[in-house]
Amino acid sequence: MCIGIPLRLDAVDGIAGRTADGIAIDLSLLPDTRPGDWVLSFLGAARRALDPDEAAQIRAALAAMAAALEGERDDDAFADLTGREPTLPPHLEAARAAGRSEA
């Protein structure tokens, strides 16, 4: 599994981007990207542009996951999941209801 990381570009030179902390990013798929833009990066390549609010939401979710892995609990980070049973996507719920163990 690959996790997308939101990164803000500090510099752009053609299809090469760089963040303020020196991370290099391939911008081949986003040729109109400019310094200051947020991108969702997978394995060093920008896959799509993000608005600042969406980038902040993703960064907060990743921080909450990292904290959970360290044993810390932050119910605010997962407020949409607190106090309810998890639900399956419709196609998996239909498979479960039909008695299937594989989707």
Image (cartoon, helix red, strand yellow):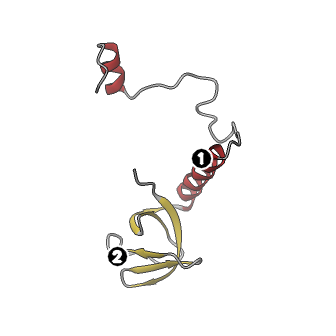
The residue at the point 34 percent across, 25 percent down is 92
Q: Position of residue 79 (x, y in %)?
A: 64, 35
**Vertical position of residue 27 compared to residue 54: above or below:** below
**Vertical position of residue 46 compared to residue 77: above or below:** below
The residue to which callout 1 is attached is 65
- Residue 14, located in which quarter of the rendered image? bottom left
- Residue 52, located in which quarter of the rendered image? bottom right
Task: Quote the CA–CA distance across marks 1 and 2.
Answer: 31 Å
Instruction: Please name whichever residue, 101 or 98, is drawn nearer the observer in this view of the structure.
Output: 101
Instruction: Please name whichever residue, 102 or 33, is drawn nearer the observer in this view of the structure.
Output: 102
Is disc 1 in contact with disc 2, using a CB cutoff of under 8 Å? no
Q: Nearer the viewer, mark 1 or mark 2?
A: 1
Q: Position of residue 12 (x, y in %)?
A: 45, 82
Instruction: Please name whichever residue, 103 or 58, is drawn nearer the observer in this view of the structure.
Output: 103
- Secondary structure, mark 2, is loop
The residue to which callout 2 is attached is 31
- Secondary structure, mark 1, is helix
Compared across the picture, whether 14 is left or right of 55 comes to left
Compared across the picture, whether 72 is left or right of 20 comes to right
Given the image, on which type of amino acid does mark 1 rest? Met
Point out which mark residue 96 bears. Answer: none
Given the image, on which type of amino acid does mark 2 rest? Pro
**Vertical position of residue 86 compared to residue 76: above or below:** above
Q: In terms of sequence position, does the residue under pointer 1 or pointer 2 come before the other? A: 2
Q: Position of residue 21 (x, y in %)?
A: 59, 77
